[in-house]
């Protein structure tokens, strides 16, 4: 699916296709490393 959205974006320049590509890429990277959780340091002082 990621390859399709990239190919569609590269052929059409459709911004929505690019945003979908980025979202899929993010989802795939999160699945590859499920222990990598964001750290919330805002409340620490």
Image (cartoon, rainbow, N blue to C red):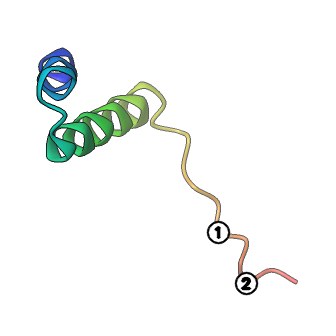
Q: Secondary structure at mark 2?
A: loop
Q: Label 1: state its secondary structure.
A: loop
Query: Residue placed farthest to the right in the image?
Result: 45
Structural distance between the alpha carbons of marks 2 and 1: 7 Å
Q: Position of residue 22 (x, y in %)?
A: 32, 38
| Residue occupying image coordinates x 25% and y 34% | 21
* Residue 18 place in picture, x, y as percent: 24, 38
Q: Which mark is residue 28?
A: none
- Residue 36 or residue 13, whichever sits in front: 13
**Quarter of the figure with the C terminus:** bottom right
The residue depicted at 14 percent of the width and 20 percent of the height is: 11
Vertical placement of residue 15 versus 6, above or below: below
Q: Residue at x 71, y 79 (%)?
A: 42
Tag 2–tag 1 contact (CB < 8 Å): yes
Q: Which residue is mark 1?
A: 40
Where is 32 relative to 39, above or below? above
Q: Residue at x 25, y 35 (%)?
A: 24
């Amino acid at each position: 699916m990621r390859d399709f959205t990239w190919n569609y974006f590269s052929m059409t320049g459709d911004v929505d296709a690019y945003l979908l590509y980025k979202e899929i890429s993010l989802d795939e990277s999160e699945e590859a490393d499920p222990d990598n959780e964001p750290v919330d340091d805002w409340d620490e002082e």
